[in-house]
Amino acid sequence: MKALVYFLTLLLVAVSCKSKKSGSGYVPPATTTTTTTPPRPPGKPEPNDMRVVIHEEMLNKMLAALGNISGKEPYSALLMKDTCFWTLIGPKIRLHPGKADFEANVNVKAGPFNYTTPVKGNVAITYDRVKNVINVKIETAVVELYTKFLGKKIHIKDIDLADQFAEPFTFDGPTATESEMEFPMPDGTTKVLLMRTSDCDLSVVEDMILVPCEMEFLPKPGATPKPAPKPAPKK
């Protein structure tokens, strides 16, 4: 009799957990993305002299190179305490016009149950003009962890995989582009010019992050025209 009462208690707890936490279906949070730098001043034209390009393929090579990403989460359900284990499978960043998404599958082991579920999240892509870096930040990627009892789905907890990517991926911006150019002049001297970027922006298009820039050419500070080389003496 005591065993029957205990079984009925467990069954009621399972139904209660299902109705309160998971309902008839799990609805992940809506996703939004941030993919641009602050807006340019009105009337200021877009830079178009040169551009830096970061391809989606390169970002995903970087994610693949991180190797195995996994974790564990303690939980309490049905008067039992246990730990579930999860592993991130095939994480990717997808670039589309004006937005970026995070996609992956997550394998979860909770007690005797083992399942794989998809996850989708937000990626913020910005260009810091002051620090001259392009930031790619996974902001949210929420996945539901659950187990089952008597065929009933029991919600354990939600975890945000973005916590595994606390710092943004950063890439050097184009303002690091600076080089000297020497030009022979008609008077026989050589003038030295400094070529560098002067204004950069950021946009996201299909498969690519673009950072277009304006270029400026200035006489190298402190440089004086070089005299023409003397011809070699005739033998």
Image (cartoon, helix red, strand yellow):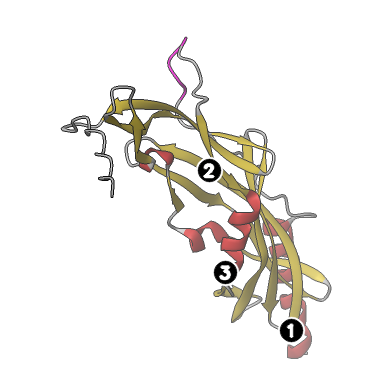
How crowded is the residue under tag 1: few (<14 C-alpha within 10 Å), some, or many (20+)? few
Q: Residue at x 44, y 51 (%)?
A: 170
Residue at image mark 2: 124
Circle 1: residue type: Pro
197 relative to 114, above or below:
above
- Of callouts 1 and 3, which one flags the residue occurring earlier in the amino acid sequence? 3
Q: Position of residue 66 (x, y in %)?
A: 54, 69
Instruction: Answer left or right for 39 relative to 93.
Output: left
Q: Nearer the viewer, residue 136 or 72?
A: 136
Distance CA(mark 1)–CA(mark 3): 31 Å
**Residue 158 makes an appearance in the image:** no
Seen in the image, is 54 located left or right of residue 175? right
Residue 121 spot, x, y in % from top left: 63, 50
Q: Quadrant of the N terminus?
A: bottom right
Can you give x and y, in whole percent of width and height, for residue 182 in the image?
Answer: 34, 35
Circle 1 SS class:
loop
Query: Label 3: which residue?
Result: 65
Q: Label 3: state its secondary structure.
A: helix
Residue found 19% across the figure and 31% down from its top: 221
State the extent of the magenta-drawn residues as a range. 39-43
Badge 1 vs badge 3, beta-carbon distance below 8 Å? no
Vertical arrangement, residue 112 with respect to residue 53, above or below: below
**Dot 2 amino acid type:** Ala
Magenta segment, prevailing SS (helix, strand or loop): loop
Dot 1 corresponds to which residue?
112
Q: Nearer the viewer, residue 147 or 198?
A: 198
Q: Is residue 64 within the magenta segment?
A: no
